[in-house]
Amino acid sequence: MITLLFIAVAYLLGSLSFAVIVSRAMRLPDPRSFGSGNPGATNVLRSGRKAAAVLTLLGDALKGWVAVVLARALAPQFGLADDVVLLCALAVFIGHLFPVFFGFKGGKGVATAFGVLLGLNPWLGLACLATWLFMAAVFRISSLSALTTALLAPVYAGLLMKWNDTTMAVLVITLLLVYRHKSNLIKLVKGEEGRIGGRS
């Protein structure tokens, strides 16, 4: 029962869409109503308010990190196995993708995935961040940067932590993230994908 409570709290935390929350607080258009329609930092940036995009990015990443770190800190006090940390990592990520507070229509999970990976292993998170930044600097296409990083994340996890349960959890996150980017994959193939900072 306690394990289910941990998972539920992580899911609810993930369901907080900071793109929508920040946009409402700053009286900006709903990010689901323009651009790509995705409630994420990249689309919020299209509103022209960089501060809103930064706050969205930080909020979405922080909730992923908090869910993992809190689960790791509190699990021993409740006599829970280490696996509860991985379950919470998946729950907060799924909460972002399918938020109960916003009709189960969430973002694509890039920032939240980064927060989760950073919580699981700081070196894993930093390796993924470096990959994303490199790809973004070279190609300036957010989705391409995210997909490349997602595909490499399980490889990094395997090299850093061996092929254990954590690596399998990272693989699940990768598969979900790629699934959420299926429309971007089509645009990439057609050469129609927008660039970072561009207006749609």
Image (spheres, grey):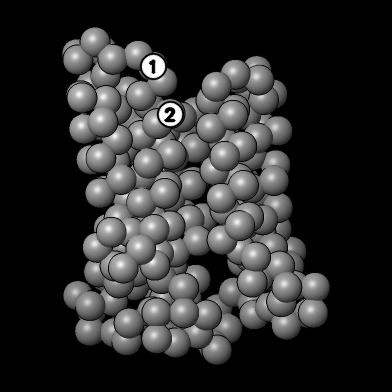
Q: Position of residue 21 (x, y in %)?
A: 25, 69
Asked whether 162 or 168 is in front, the reply is: 168
Binning the other alpha carbons within 10 Å of mark 2 as few (below 14), some (14 to 19) or many (20 upward) gives many
- Rendered position, 80 above or below 137: above
Please tell me whether mark 2 sits on a helix, a strand or a loop.
helix
Q: Residue furthest front?
A: 1
- Rendered position, 119 above or below 135: above
Q: Which mark is residue 86?
A: 2
Residue type at tag 2: Leu
- Rendered position, 169 above or below 16: above
In the image: residue 26, left or right of residue 89: left
Instruction: Tell me whether circle 1 and circle 2 mark residues in contact (CB < 8 Å).
Output: yes
Mark count: 2
Q: Position of residue 174 (x, y in %)?
A: 60, 45
Residue type at tag 1: Asp
Asked whether 32 or 130 is in front, the reply is: 32
Q: Position of residue 43 (x, y in %)?
A: 47, 76
Task: Say which residue label 1 marks.
Answer: 82
